[in-house]
Amino acid sequence: MSGNPIFELRGVQQRYGDRTALEIPSLVVPEGCILGVAGHNGSGKSTLMRLLAFLERPFQGEVLFRDRAVTDSGVRQRREVTLLTQEPYLLLRSVAANVGYGLKVRGNLDADQGRTRVREALAMVGLEPDVFEHRSWRELSGGEAQRVALAARLVLRPQVLLMDEPTSSLDPENAERLLGAAVLARREWGATLVVVSHDAAWLESVSDGVLRIVQGRIASAPDFCRSRE
Ligand SMILES: Nc1ncnc2c1ncn2[C@@H]1O[C@H](COP(=O)(O)OP(=O)(O)O)[C@@H](O)[C@H]1O
Ligand SMILES: [Mg+2]
């Protein structure tokens, strides 16, 4: 892993009330890596993901994205980073409307280009476009819904895909498809992946290296996560 840092954490501490949920003196996430994050329940994994997704600001320290501190107006960064959680959030509409929603909001493609991109994204997550495009959100299994939620993100070609226990309620086939799509995003446009799971062995097999968090602190980290300074 020799990519430039896409994220860098410096002296980060996150607190809720008087509890310190996470304390990370230094951490680098190189561009294009697949970083696994493992730890028991309550160890701070989701807190780390929310910080990387800019959904929270740290109580102390800073989170840099491509060497720049994320400001309140970090709209550009927010567009490049997307977080998928265990609970897929879908609009009560067709699969195509769900997957195409973000493209429509950004409004820089015509209808044909948009539809092509939606179909490509469905194919990436292993959902046959002809079969699923016109389905209602009601006709999806939990695993399919999770894959549609991922397609809705991949269609925007995010630079960073954060996945917080994305497969914990999925059967092995859906889990494999979901991860396979994320790996394709790295191959096709160099996306960086950060994948959280409490299953360290599984993470070891799918990632370039695993960050282990114990009670809010880094217990071990891959070499490529060390700062070069
Ligand atoms: N919004 C919050 N308010 C208060 N405490 C929180 C909040 N989010 C997380 N915590 C606490 O921070 C710690 C880490 O939580 P979390 O990051 O969700 O862990 P994990 O994802 O590894 O299970 C836990 O003790 C949790 O109770
Ligand atoms: Mg969590």
Image: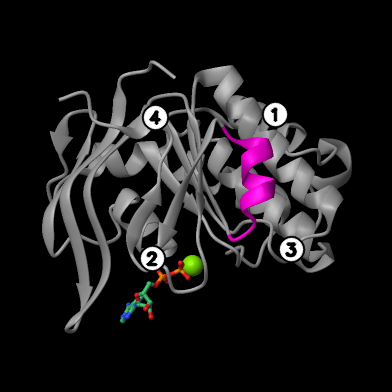
In this picture, residue 124 sits left or right of residue 209:
right
In the picture of the structure, the residue carrying the numbered disc 2 is 44
Task: Classify the position of the C terminus by image quarter.
Answer: top left
60 above or below 152? Answer: below
In the picture of the structure, the residue carrying the numbered disc 4 is 223
Give the x, y percent position of residue 162: 47, 46
Magenta region, main secondary structure: helix
**Contact between labelled residues 4 and 2, with CB atoms less than 8 Å apart:** no
Task: List the single residue furthest toward the right.
Answer: 131
**Contact between labelled residues 3 and 4, with CB atoms less than 8 Å apart:** no
**Label 1 vs 2, first from the N-terminus:** 2
**Label 2 vs 4, first from the N-terminus:** 2
The amino acid beneath tag 1 is Glu
In the picture of the structure, the residue carrying the numbered disc 1 is 120
Residue at 40% in and 41% down: 221
The amino acid beneath tag 4 is Asp
**Label 4 vs 3, first from the N-terminus:** 3
**Label 3 vs 2, first from the N-terminus:** 2
Q: Secondary structure at mark 4?
A: helix
Return the mark for residue 184. Answer: none
**Contact between labelled residues 3 and 1, with CB atoms less than 8 Å apart:** no
- Which contiguous range is marked in magenta? 198-207
**Label 1 vs 3, first from the N-terminus:** 1
203 above or below 181? Answer: below
Q: What is the spatial separation of the Cα atoms under label 3 and label 2, in whole angstroms?
A: 32 Å
In the image, residue 29 lies in the stretch drawn in magenta? no
